[in-house]
């Protein structure tokens, strides 16, 4: 390595950006665990429709993925254009999932028998006594 390359590499640290102290990783771990518990808890709550439940679950998952990308993939310390590309990917994924959900909800018709609950089964009756 030439003297210029060595000076350049040593002045900017290693190639992976600044190191996070262990307390940052611990805080991110705690945040991810809390969000996981919130996701599990939210799965037991009915928020009105299946679409709302999916949107809530995907929002929590997006927050968790953002934390992983920011701290473990070092996007927080990378060039801003890389963060813009990652955020754009999340936004487009959200749009691509949102429109089919809206379409699916709009097609559910309360009068359609396929969307109604099935009637309870009729209990069998005792056989009639034989007639003589």
Image (cartoon, rainbow, N blue to C red):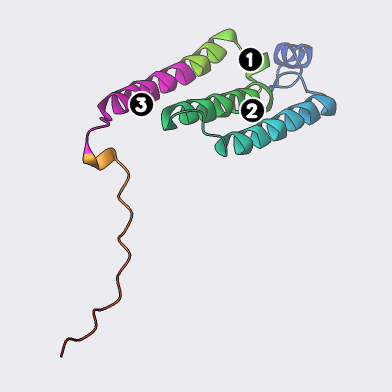
Residue 40: image location, x then y, percent = 61, 39
Q: Residue furthest left?
A: 132
Residue 26: image location, x then y, percent = 80, 30
Which residue, given by chain and number where applicable, does mark 3 sit on?
101
Pointers 3 and 2 in contact (CB under 8 A)? no
Mark-to-mark CA distance, 3 and 1: 34 Å
Mark-to-mark CA distance, 3 and 2: 26 Å
Which residue, given by chain and number where applicable, does mark 2 sit on?
68
Q: Is 56 rendered above or below residue 10? A: below
Residue 78: give its label.
1
Q: State which quadrant residue 114 falls in.
A: top left
What residue do we see at 62% from left, 28% from top?
64
Find numbered disc 2 in the image and state the secondary structure of the residue it sits on.
helix
Find numbered disc 1 in the image and state the secondary structure of the residue it sits on.
loop
Q: Nearer the viewer, residue 81 or 101?
A: 101
What residue do we see at 30% from left, 69% from top?
124
Q: Is 34 rendered above or below residue 88? A: below
Taking 103 as reference, is 74 left or right?
A: right
Position of the C terminus, as image quadrant, is bottom left
Q: State which quadrant residue 108 falls in.
A: top left
Mark-to-mark CA distance, 2 and 1: 14 Å
Q: Earlier in the sequence, mark 3 or mark 1?
A: 1
Magenta region: 89-112
């Amino acid at each position: 390595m030439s003297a210029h390359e060595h000076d350049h590499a040593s002045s900017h640290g290693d190639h992976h950006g600044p190191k996070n102290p262990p307390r940052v990783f611990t805080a991110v771990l705690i945040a991810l665990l809390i969000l996981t518990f919130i996701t599990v808890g939210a799965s037991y709550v009915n928020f009105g429709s299946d679409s709302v439940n999916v949107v809530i679950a995907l929002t929590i998952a997006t927050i968790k993925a953002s934390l992983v990308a920011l701290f473990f993939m070092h996007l927080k310390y990378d060039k801003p254009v890389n963060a813009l590309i990652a955020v754009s990917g999340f936004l487009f994924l959200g749009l691509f999932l949102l429109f089919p959900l809206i379409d699916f909800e709009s097609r559910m018709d309360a009068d359609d028998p396929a969307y109604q609950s099935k009637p309870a089964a009729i209990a069998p009756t005792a056989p009639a006594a034989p007639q003589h």
